[in-house]
Image (spheres, grey):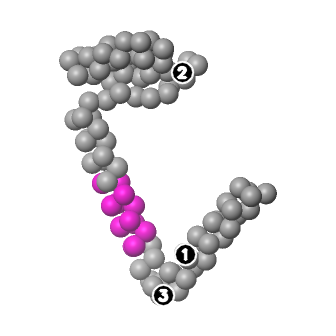
Amino acid sequence: MAPRMGTKQARSNFSEPLGTVHFGHETVIVEKASKPFVVVISPEQYEHYRALVSEQAVRTTERMHERNEHLDPEQLERDITAVVEQVRQERHERRNG
């Protein structure tokens, strides 16, 4: 289980979570109001995370392509554009009342 500390403790002694990550090879969870606020990880963990996310994005894109390869590309683009525009319009209406 990753060590946890409050934001005040992390702020007042920033070298502590950094040392725990760098020298102790542990992830540190910094909490605010007893809830996870940020996670401090090593550069190696970060690169591993980025590789996983990238790999997942590639697999998702491949699955989407396979599911839609029977559709007309131009019609698919028109459909996607229409949905994106609808979402943007709804978001604009929510923001501007």
Q: Earlier in the sequence, mark 1 or mark 2?
A: 2
Secondary structure beneath label 1: helix
Tell me the distance, in whole angstroms, between the alpha carbons under discs 1 and 2: 39 Å
Q: Is residue 48 magenta?
A: no
Which of the numbered marks, if any, corresponds to residue 80? Answer: 1
Residue 47, percent from left and from top? 25, 42
Q: Nearer the viewer, mark 2 or mark 3?
A: 2
Secondary structure beneath label 2: strand
- Pointer 3: what residue? 74
> At label 3, which amino acid type do we have?
Glu
- Pointer 2: what residue? 32
Frontmost residue, 85 versus 61: 85
> At label 1, which amino acid type do we have?
Ile
Tag 3 near tag 1, CB within 8 Å: no
Q: Residue at x 40, y 73 (%)?
A: 65
* 92 lies above or below 66: above
* Quadrant (top left, top right, bottom left, bottom right) of the N terminus: top left
Residue 58, percent from left and from top? 33, 61
Task: Please state the extent of the stretch shown in magenta in the rendering.
Answer: 55-66
